[in-house]
């Protein structure tokens, strides 16, 4: 039995070594019928193998998170374009020196929105501080889309408290790198948006949405829809920054037109402080401390 296992391991090692050698030499691999199917990138990237790729994107992050005890997460969404106050200050000084009015307007807007970065960071610290005193099955871990901006801020806050922190990144035409505050072994990259969003929901015990663009709205309304239609269990859905969200959409119009009910408004809460966001989650689950 030991010999069989060693032989299998050697074959796997040989297959991956072949791939690595070609990649290192910058040589495209030619189709090879004899290559092991799972070690054949040309085969795995065929349209007919899409189902296999779905399964792999489902399985890999699930196994890794389970192995590290990540069972319950607080998902933080928000704009990738909101930077830290330090970065915003530096950009403002540079814009002022340039004398460029357009650059100055952009820098002033970045500085105005930088407080959201700090608030996301502080919120994550609250979650991590609570979890640090709990046994592993009761801990909550911060999970984000893994990119810059609000995502970075939330990962950063948890990281600063010594907590594991999850990043679910996505491959985009303009490559988005994972932020440096994600636990390396919990930094995942997806090709399929659908599988990425599924992973957000599998472990989510709460969602906190900071101001953001189309991606934030897509993720937010997917969660609201799943909860509204009872395809997912109710979880706290917190909209951080009431002024932004109330300016962005008028839900009373939807009530007046009968496309949602007043009860649907109870699916989410508006808050403006990190402590208030954490209070919503604590109250929902009856958490203490």
Image (tube, rainbow, N blue to C red):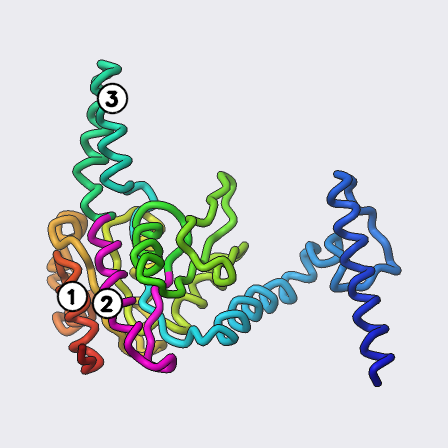
Of residues 228 and 175, the one nearer the viewer is 175
Classify mark 3: residues with Cα within 10 Å, few (<14), some (14-19) or many (20+).
Answer: some
1 or 2: tag closer to the N-terminus? 2
Classify mark 2: residues with Cα within 10 Å, few (<14), some (14-19) or many (20+).
Answer: many
Of residues 142 and 242, the one nearer the viewer is 142
Q: Is residue 55 left or right of residue 24?
A: left
Q: Real-space Cα distance between discs 1 and 2?
A: 6 Å
Decide whether the magenta segment is chiefly helix, strand or loop.
Answer: helix
Q: Real-space Cα distance between discs 1 and 3?
A: 37 Å
- Which segment is the magenta one? 118-143
Asked which secondary structure carries label 2, the reply is strand
Which residue extends farthest bottom?
Answer: 1
Of residues 131 and 24, the one nearer the viewer is 131
Q: Residue at x 37, y 58 (%)?
A: 144
Q: Is residue 271 left or right of residue 135?
A: left
Of residues 239 and 227, the one nearer the viewer is 239
- Among the 4 quarters of the image, the one containing residue 121: bottom left
- Among the 4 quarters of the image, the one containing residue 98: top left
| Residue occupied by mark 1 | 269
Image spot of residue 65 (x, y percent): 48, 71
Asked if disc 2 and disc 3 are in contact, CB closer than 8 Å, the reply is no
| Residue occupied by mark 2 | 237
| Residue occupied by mark 3 | 95
User: Looking at the rendering, in which quadrant would you find the C terminus?
Assistant: bottom left
Task: Tell me if residue 179 is in the magenta stretch.
Answer: no
Residue 152 in view (yes/no) = yes
Question: How many marks overall?
Answer: 3
């Amino acid at each position: 039995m030991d010999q069989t296992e060693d032989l299998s391991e050697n074959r796997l090692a040989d297959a991956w070594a072949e791939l690595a050698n070609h990649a290192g030499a910058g040589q495209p691999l030619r189709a090879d019928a004899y290559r092991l199917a799972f070690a054949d990138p040309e085969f795995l990237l065929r349209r007919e193998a899409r189902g296999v790729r779905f399964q792999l994107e489902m399985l890999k992050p699930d196994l890794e998170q389970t192995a590290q005890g990540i069972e319950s997460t607080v998902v933080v969404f928000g704009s990738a374009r909101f930077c830290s106050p330090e970065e915003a200050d530096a950009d403002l000084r540079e814009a002022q020196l340039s004398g460029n009015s357009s650059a100055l307007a952009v820098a002033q807007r970045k500085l105005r929105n930088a407080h959201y970065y700090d608030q996301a960071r502080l919120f994550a610290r609250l979650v991590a501080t609570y979890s640090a005193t709990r046994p592993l099955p009761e801990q909550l871990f911060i999970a984000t889309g893994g990119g810059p901006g609000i995502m970075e801020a939330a990962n950063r806050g948890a990281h600063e408290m010594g907590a594991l922190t999850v990043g679910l990144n996505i491959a985009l035409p303009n490559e988005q790198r994972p932020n440096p505050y994600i636990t390396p072994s919990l930094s995942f990259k997806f090709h399929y948006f659908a599988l990425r969003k599924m992973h957000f929901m599998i472990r989510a015990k709460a969602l906190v949405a900071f101001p953001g663009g189309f991606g934030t709205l897509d993720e937010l309304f997917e969660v609201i829809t799943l909860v509204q239609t009872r395809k997912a269990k109710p979880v706290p859905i917190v909209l951080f920054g009431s002024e932004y969200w109330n300016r962005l959409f008028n839900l009373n119009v939807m009530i007046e037109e009968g496309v949602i009910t007043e009860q649907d408004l109870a699916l989410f809460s508006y808050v403006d402080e990190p402590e208030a966001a954490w209070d919503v989650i604590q109250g929902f689950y009856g958490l203490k401390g």
